[in-house]
Amino acid sequence: MNIEIKDFIQQYHNHPILFIGTGISKRYLKNAYTWDSLLEKIAFEISNNEEYYLSLKYKFKSDEGYDYPQIALQIENEFDSIAEGDRNGKFKDINDAFFKLLKEGSETSRFKLYIAKLLSSLDYIEDKVEELNEFKKTRKNVSSIVTTNYDELIESTFDFIPLIGNSILLSNPYGSVYKIHGCIQEPEKIVITSTDYEYFDAKYELIRAQLLSLFIHNPIIFIGYSIEDKNIKKLLSTIFTYVNPKSEIAEKIRNNFLLIEYEEGSSNTLVTEYDVKLEDFPLIKINKLKTDDFSTLYQSISELHLPISAMDIRKVENIVKELHEGGEIKVHITEDLDKLSNADKVLAIGSSKTIKYEYQTANEMMKNYFDIVEEANKQLLSLVDKHRITSTQYFPMYAFALINENISLSEHLKSQQKNILENALDKLGVTFNAINKVTTIEAILTDENISQSRKDDAIFFSIMNMYIEPDDLEGYLKKYENKSTTGYRRLLCAYDLIKYGEN
């Protein structure tokens, strides 16, 4: 089988789950490590001798490769011993954190605290930022993410909720990051040594069952692993221990699997079948794409057309969760929305003939502007034509028009947006024409000659005259407290015009 990745993804009838390995962190972060390079760095930090780590690898090598969990256990013991013996030495900050946790009633090894320190910052690789933005756009179609990575790249990119340890069992499968090997936010739960894996395997049964349920019902895309990765093979072995490899369910699972394997410089976009050899099982066929063109993959996921976005399902499940937990929630189950009075939350159940649901109002689209643009949510933007935007109403149309070229009111709303902004600028001209060309928002906010009530006016004047950069204004708008005000809407429309306008 040879099929283009876009055509392969379009076959999905459900939201895919991403299973992400260290290759993704290595692709986008400067301070990312493979298992081997992480242990090598820490070994050198405690010994100042590269031969120390080479000796450990030699000691724990077998026909199946290096036993990294055993190597990690040796390094953990040595690291903790050295740090303990020199309280205020090289690892003073680690000792400080270690004793602080003990005072708070928690504990973890100094070794794991050091791992958390190494991975604590998100230092992005500059020439991959654009591709990472394409990755972010997939979140509207991604159900959840499973990762063996410790860093926080995925939750920061997708704004998904990280789940660690037993919290995985109480999870909402939409909008979650299952961090099955732990996270730097909770170093004590990091799984890296042989002791950790023994404990993990003993406690993993319920988590394994939860993940197996997800894998049966959703397409699974593995990214950041090689075909020979032990995590992949162990997962496949686990699945086919519970599922007969010759059954219809097994065939469904195989068809749902797609492995993305990195090949430097390759622009390949063809998905092929690949045979995986598992111990005690016959050959397992899975789908594989070997490439360096991750942008095409991300665009294929982002352009997947499903009846409802994964983010909308996440919102509904959160409401249902609140219903289960009780609280001050007004609930009406009906097929006639006209019979409802105002309520904080509405759950409408009925047929498509009697219920019509349009997700976001024009004001809600403005509040969620940056999420919509980052996700390139083309389906949601189809609703723009259903809204009545008056000639005096601020509405940011330029970015929306680039995402969805089928909005019939696009040109009219862009012209309307430009006119209302130019009129607003003319009214401010008398007041602000005399000010210097201030090049940052911070300079405006700290300028004592501009009153607090006129700060937004000055920012608007400066962005419209292109004295300040749109990216500077973007940060300001994302932190803006009240997104219902005219001031916010005017600044947002000015940002949209300058950032995405044709001229």
Image (cartoon, grey):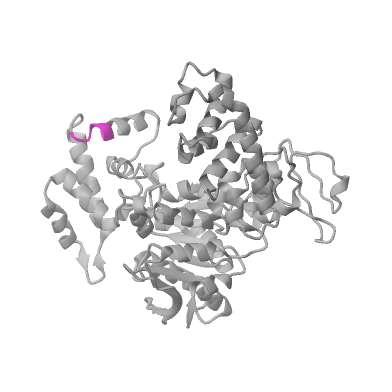
Q: Is residue 256 left or right of residue 153?
A: right
Looking at the rendered structure, the number of numbered marks drawn on it comes to 0
Tell me which corner region of the image, top left, top right, bottom left or bottom right, holds residue 71.
Answer: bottom left
- The residue furthest right is 339
Residue 86, compared with residue 249, is above or below; it is above
Give the image quarter of residue 326: top right
Q: Is residue 451 magenta?
A: no
Residue 375 vertical position relative to residue 434 in the rendered view, above or below: below
Magenta stretch, main secondary structure class: helix
Front residue of this view, candidates 321 and 461: 461
Q: What residue is at 16 percent from the left and 61 percent from the top? A: 59
Left or right of 357? Residue 88 is: left
What's drawn in magenta, residue-wise?
A: 90-95
State whether residue 63 is above or below residue 487.
below
- Residue 78 in the image, given as x and y percentages of width and height: 19, 45
Let me know if residue 296 appears in the view.
Answer: yes
Horizontal and vertical percent position of residue 274: 41, 79
Q: Do we see residue 165 in this rendering?
A: no
**Front position in the image: 327 or 479:** 479
Instruction: Give the left or right position of residue 461, taking residue 292 as reference.
Output: right
Q: Camera-side residue: 302 or 459?
A: 459
Q: Position of residue 3 (x, y in %)?
A: 49, 79
Q: Nearer the viewer, residue 282 or 205?
A: 282
